[in-house]
Image: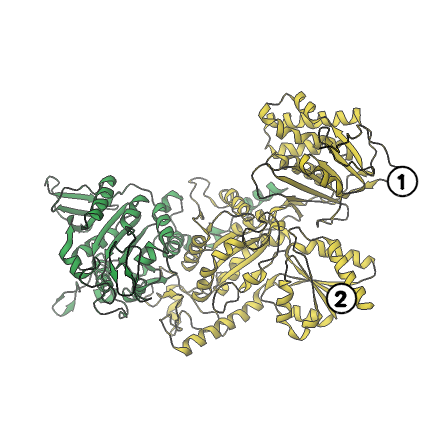
Amino acid sequence: MTVETKTNGKPHVNRIGLTSQDYRGGETTLCQGCGHNSITSQIIAAAFELSLAPHQVIKMSGIGCSSKTPAYFMSRSFGFNTLHGRMPSVTTGAVLANRTLLAIGISGDGDTGSIGLGQFKHMVRRNVPVVYIVENNGVYGLTKGQFSATADVGQTLKYAGTNVLPPIDICIEALAADCGFVARSFAGDAKQVRELLKAAMSFHGTAVIDIISPCVTFNNHHDSTKSYDYGKAHEERLQDIQFIPRFDEVHIDYDEGDERYVQLHDGPMIKLRKLGRDYDPTNKWHAIELLERARQNHEFITGLLYINTQRQTLHETMHLTSTPLAYLSEEELRPSRERFERVMQRFM
Amino acid sequence: MTHVIETETQPRPLDDLESEPIVNDFSIVAATVNGSGSQTANNVLMRAIFKMGIPVSGKNLFPSNIQGLPTWFIIRVSKDGYTARRDTTEILIAFNQRTADEDLASLVPGGVCIHPNDVKFTNPRSDVFFYPLPVRELVRQSGADAKLRDYIANMVYVGAVAELLGIDMNEIKAALERHFKGKSKPIALNYGVVVAAAEWVRANLSKVDRFRVEPMEKTQGLILVDGNTAAAFGALMGGMTVCAWYPITPSTSLVDAMTELAPILRADPVTGTTTYAIIQTEDEIAAAGIIVGAGWAGARAMTATSGPGLSLMNEFVSLAYFAEVPCVIWDVQRMGPSTGLPTRTSQGDVLSAYYMGHGDTRHVVLFPGTMTECFEFGYLAFDLAERLQTPVLVLSDLDLGMNNWMSEPFTYPEKPFDRGKVLTADELERFKDWGRYKDLDGDGIPYRTLPGNPNPRAAYLARGTGHNEYAIYSERPTDWQQNLDRLTRKHNTARTLVPKPIILDDELANIGIIAYGSTDPAVREAGDILRARGIRTAYLRIRALPLEATLTDFLAKYERVYVVELNQDGQMAQLVQLHAPEYAARVRSVRICNGLPMTAQFVVDSIMRAEQAKRE
């Protein structure tokens, strides 16, 4: 999938003069057909369309198939493939050090739902600015097919047999920790993934997108709730989502009943067009209720589940200086002699 | 209790003891109940003596408990300036009934026991002077609120000790004023009790013991500080920008001090915005993760922890070592595996810190031994971490970190920061064959770029997985081997950059002593005692790992070298032997692992015994 279009034989460039090629990464080493590869393509597309400066993006990941993907997009961006389940803390440190960086975190269901659940929740609680993508396939791929904590009850795997434990719902966990941007999507729904990514990349604070991303090798059989077939057959979109960037001069008619606009910081907007059901994504109770019912009724609901633009980010709560800490000069970091003496006086 | 014998209200002099006064050379132990507020009283006493120009040191032996268990505060008064712990107690403040018998038994003959008149001793000694005090009565007369009476009670012993030893009441008052930051009401209340107690002692007891203080001129210009505060101060002077931490005794007070000092040193006085982030995390794993992320992105990042927390940081330290990320970890050591003795001191993390991690890892480890070094290593650790692009561990301990030490005032750091080999976008232009992990200078240290660097060649993916010189994923055996060989080269470069040992030489010495960290005062005192007994020693104090040539030369000079430390397995002795296997047989381990700070007596006894055995 590419957004690149050619006119007059010249590659299409974005607002900062880059082509979509400039947002590409190394060649994937994941299985052919892996849902993660589709998500990678949409990250490239979203970054290109938003004209993100590659050097201002940091690609963060934990360990697992999903966490390998930062090598497959945006080679001109810095990245850190960290420890299993610990990407949230490393990301917290990186954005504390440099608040101008845009962090894109890639995790998986094992990385977030099992070993990293604690760090995930504390990252959300602190409202660390990061686009946190969970590439969720319900199975451990690199270790050859164990269940992850997001697998539904009754699911079967060749290696692991039948799962008898209830799943951890990443979106409910995010909501419980007061996440300001909670979405679910499906790797097979390229457009929705892309629009959600653009919205998340423009959000101030932690934006969690739980993307069901089939594992073609271990968990894509027809009765798997994390398979392509299941996703295609059962996905129910809450809304038709369109991201409207700040630089687009569009006429917005607020009166249309089926459409809703959510204003993000610094101008961009999310346009949500109602589909099947009435749903208010600014009501956390509704979001939790929706997800609980979906679990009971075996529904696969995608879209923007919850948005709250009012929470302060980590930087704001910490009253950090606007200059990135990493860029402060020695003059700014070493206290003056006068301040030094003031402290010394306390010990005299 | 059936064997309780009432103590005499009026002590009598003991004829069989010498009557010459003992001036400025004794230890006071205040035995109290944890949480009773005795810290204020102890600090006031210590500070008053210190301000009389007399060298002091204060050690708090406290339980892992919030309220109720016994606690002891030891003030050593030493005209010679010795600050190590001593095994003997000359003056006991027996304010805890539960430990009263045991405390009394620890007094030297001729010692002093100051106690509330309702504290009973099962077996009162006849070779000790008792001064019973009507504590309840004096507190009642103070008119203090009932809630404050337990706290005020401690001021009774301050007054009694001041009267009996001859401590300047003006200094007591000054110490109270300092403690209560000039608030007149608590100052008046506390000082009132002190004066009332002193007057009661003067009117009702006669001084019969031999202990006195007399003003000296040995502490003028000195400060009293604890190592954790010194470390926090140093780190802030060194441009610490991110501190992530999880509370654990005895490192918590380091971050507490940082939180207190940072706004004075590093906040904008007008807007209140800060040039630092201090963040309390959900656990030590997250604390380590945050400093690794911050160090990678260009911050001077640190954490403070103790043994159990250090264990949790293991995986991250391996990652930082291999991904070559600077960060600083202060390990304020406490005693034992697991929870162990969490409020007691130890040097038990030497080996685990040096080799911390999985795979082949060796780290730069610093050992501050004085307050000045706690301060200086506070910023030096960042210079080394950034120069070497690696985690630097600073091993302090509870004794250094939480106890009160005299020190020369710290001096303003004049040396500029060393931010290491960091390439800006323009600088990178000049490096045609730059690779993030490529050794261009032959010292094993590559050049790094920071996230946000706009040069299109600057970006790289940091990772713990195998990579080649250009930070590209690689499982090729030669890439792996070359990378580890370079890291070994880097470790050898570190050997040349870390602080050199401090040597106290003696031309006539026939044996050597090696020590590090908080045992320094005990070893210095031991050296003086041994010298008086005819054994001349040279002393080398290790200040960092990896070990280097100065140590080898020292080992070459002496037939027997005693390595003094506070752990069970002689951990540093092992490293010394590994460092210089040709001299391994010369190395003798002098070690104790009982949770208490080292004493000179233990060092002297151990070495005397070994030397005598040698002669026989």
| Nearer to the camera, A253 or A239 | A239
Judging from the image, what secondary structure is the residue with disc 1 in?
A: loop
Crowdedness near tag 2: few (<14), some (14–19) or many (≥20) residues, C-alpha within 10 Å: many
Q: CA distance from mark 2 to mark 1?
A: 40 Å
The N terminus of chain A sits in image quarter: bottom left
Rendering colour (chain B): yellow
Crowdedness near tag 1: few (<14), some (14–19) or many (≥20) residues, C-alpha within 10 Å: few
Q: Are marks 2 and 1 on the same chain?
A: yes
Q: Nearer the viewer, mark 2 or mark 1?
A: 1
Rendering colour (chain A): green
Question: Which residue lies under the disc numbered 1?
Answer: B16
| Nearer to the camera, A29 or B421 | A29
Q: What's under tag 1, amino acid-wise?
A: Asp
Q: Does residue A105 appear in this view?
A: no
| Nearer to the camera, B348 or A248 | B348
Q: Does residue A278 appear in this view?
A: yes
Among numbered discs 2 and 1, the one appearing first in the sequence: 1
Estimate the x, y position of residue B233 in percent, counting from the top left. Answer: 55, 48
Who's the residue at 42% across and 75% down the image?
B480
Who's the residue at 75% across and 71% down the image?
B559
**Where on the picture, by quarter, is residue A283?**
top left
Q: Where is B571 relative to B116, above or below?
A: below
Chain designation of label 1: B
**Where on the picture, by quarter, is residue B159?**
top right
Tell me: A339 left or right of B292: right
Estimate the x, y position of residue B9 in percent, counting from the top left. Answer: 79, 27
Question: Which residue lies under the disc numbered 2?
Answer: B511
Q: What's under tag 2, amino acid-wise?
A: Ile
Tell me: B28 left or right of A341: right
Q: Is the residue under label 1 in contact with that under label 2 (CB below 8 Å)?
A: no
